[in-house]
Amino acid sequence: FNLFLVAAHEFGHALGLSHSNDQKALMFPNYAYVTLSEFPLSAGDISGIQSIYGSRPNAPDRRPATPTSPKTCGSQISFDAITTFRQEVIFLKGRHLWRVYPDNSEAELELISALWPTLSSGIQAAYENTKDQILFFK
């Protein structure tokens, strides 16, 4: 027996399904060996669960949204805040930050949450004090 299919059958019972007379259905009372790649749910299994819980009106888009990063060049560029941090210069904009190290002219783009996980967006100013701490103002 295939443990996945046995568990799926029992999960069907937990969801409220009873046995089916369709030999190809997941909820058929006798197990048979089936290759998982060749095992679609039968129409009876689907209609049975939908009769209990309803059908899904619109299937979600399975493609994840393509992340976009802010543009780094242009005459209209503005930042929410700019500060130093241990000799780095940090530019903050929305959810992103750019870090410029003293020995590198290329800015590195990161999410603010990668450096400060609890810091939310909406920063209006930032200041590094003499104790190497950054104070953020919203």
Image: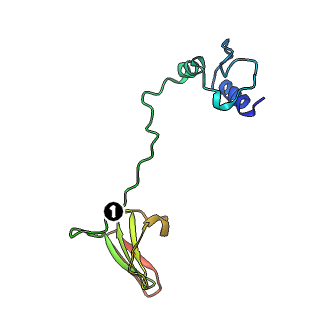
At 47% from the left and 28% from the top, the residue drawn is 56
Q: Quadrant of residue 37?
A: top right
The quadrant where residue 111 appears? bottom left
Question: How are the colours assigned in the image?
Answer: rainbow
Quadrant in which the C terminus appears? bottom left
Which residue does the numbered mark 1 point to in the structure image? 70
The quarter of the picture where the N terminus appears is top right
Q: From this view, report whether residue 128 is shown above or below residue 124.
A: below
Hey, what amino acid is under mark 1? Pro
Q: Nearer the viewer, residue 85 or 73?
A: 73
Rendering quarter of residue 124: bottom left
Locate residue 96 relative to residue 30 in the image: left or right: left
Q: Is residue 27 left or right of residue 123?
A: right
Residue visible at 69% across and 26% down? Answer: 9
Q: Position of residue 99 (x, y in %)?
A: 41, 75
Q: Residue at x 39, y 62 (%)?
A: 95
* Residue 6 to residue 91: above or below: above
The percent position of residue 108, horizontal first and vertical second, equals: 42, 72
Tell me if 109 is positioned left or right of 30 in this view.
left
Residue at horizontal 32 percent and vertical 73 percent from the top: 81
